[in-house]
Image (tube, rainbow, N blue to C red):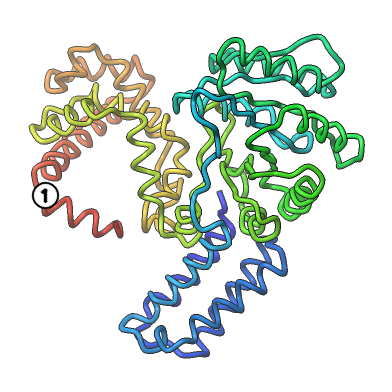
Amino acid sequence: MLEKISDKFSDIVKQVSGKSTISEKNIQDAVEEIKLALLEADVNLRVVRRFVNRTIEEAKGEEVLRSVNPGQQFIKIVHDKIVGLLGDERQKLELKGPDTQSGILMMGLQGSGKTTTAAKLAKQLKKEGRSPLLVAADLVRPAAVKQLQVLGEQIDVPVYAEESKDPVKVVKHALAEAKKNLYNTVIVDTTGRLHLDEEMMKEIQRIHKAAQPVESLFVADAMTGQDAVKIAKEFDEKVGITGVVLSKFDSDTRGGAALSLKSVTGKPLKYIGIGEKPDDLEPFFPDRIASRILGMGDVVSLVEKAQETIDEDEAAKLQQKMASATFTLEDYLESFARMRKMGSMESLLEMIPGAKGNISEDDIDEGEMKREEAIILSMTRQERRNHRILGPSRRKRVAKGSGTSVFEVNRLIKKFEKMRLMMKKVAKNKKYQAQMMKSLGV
């Protein structure tokens, strides 16, 4: 995500951060590069001008020009200004207490991912302890109701639907149903259109009046850039929005919408959609996204993703195995599944400090990982738990069963043994751990 703008900013960071002295011309040149990067990213022109002027004004201050490390000081200013564009701090949903009903209205154009986002949000809130009810009030798009029902089954969240042509009536009945069955969060999926029109706006206004939502979220397709910003502004003027969810954020290479929305609409970005799965919705953290744009990684998100795939007891056991060199091929096999749960290799690389521009997806061979997985799966449980019993005849059998060669089996075992030694060293040596984290820039 945000590859194009991130590549540009990463280059600017490299040019400036190493400078021991910095002049007004250095600043002017760097800001000009930033300006071009923002315009190429389809960021709103007025937003770019404001960003550039404020950056120049602050960077030309005595504090930067005469600081001990002016290059890094300048990068910090740029980072803080990007955070400001994105909204300063994470904005949570303003929901009522668990004993009171809270309505959430989902709005947007057709094709923006509104229905899918409604289901993702329901799953997210369910994980947080809320009791959600999805409401199928999109009665225009063919199969919209069915789509929401299928998604509801997948995430085990009830969906209210009825045979009706009046979405306002559906919403009113759904609210009564929610009250009766103690659902404290009602998420209403509304009708979208291929373009803005008066009829759609009037319908959403009527639904809004009936639902009385505490949150009115506009779902925007991140890939549409400035169009998403203009449409969000119109929805806010005619209906009123409390926040924005940017869908398809994982496919957005430019970042124009993300960097313009808060400044233009005054409304915060609350969530981003990072894939098609029900779990692929993340809270929007301006500081973390700013760090990714500048190629500085996002260690906090990486740690959070790791914590979601492995609990504390498992982590303690794994650390013990690493320290005592009892980490097995079976454990290694389980690590593949954990990595897949954490997301794509590309998204993980974005979160590792220093990886941007130094490590690419090509450097991490997905094909090699699949071959290794096939080799381990062709072993017996006993062999996975004790690779030392894998003699020549067993290795030959494993190679045949996995569709690989004995050479590839030998290479995996050799790699695994080397990795175990390194794990033992890291797990036991606190100083070495600190050096590793420092090398990552953490």
Residue for badge 1? 430
Classify residue 80 as left or right of residue 32: left
Residue type at tag 1:
Lys
In the rendered view, would you say 418 is above or below 29? above
Q: Up-down: is 411 above or below 256?
A: above
Residue 409 location, quadrant = top left
Quick one: 137 or 209, which is closer to the camera? Answer: 209
| Residue 228 at x, y percent in the picture | 74, 49
Q: 21 or 141, which lies in front? A: 141
Q: Quadrant of residue 140?
A: top right
Q: Residue at x 53, y 64 (%)?
A: 82
Q: Bin the neighbour count of mark 1 within 10 Å (Cα to Cα): few under 14, some 14-19, many 20 and up.
A: few
Q: Position of residue 91 (x, y in %)?
A: 53, 47
On screen, residue 102 versus residue 188, left or right, reads: left
Query: What residue is at 30 percent from the left and 29 percent from the top?
Result: 310
Counting from the top left corner in percent of width and height, residue 94 is at 55, 39
Question: Which quarter of the image is occupied by the C terminus?
Answer: bottom left
Residue farthest to the right, as pictured = 198
Q: Please provide percent x and percent y for residue 120.
A: 57, 28
Q: Is residue 232 above or below residue 39?
A: above
Left or right of 418, for residue 44: right
Q: Secondary structure at mark 1?
A: helix
Q: Nearer the viewer, residue 351 or 131?
A: 131
Total numbered labels placed on residues in the image: 1
217 is higher (above) or lower (below) than 6: above
Which residue is rendered at x = 50% and y = 80% of the image? 58
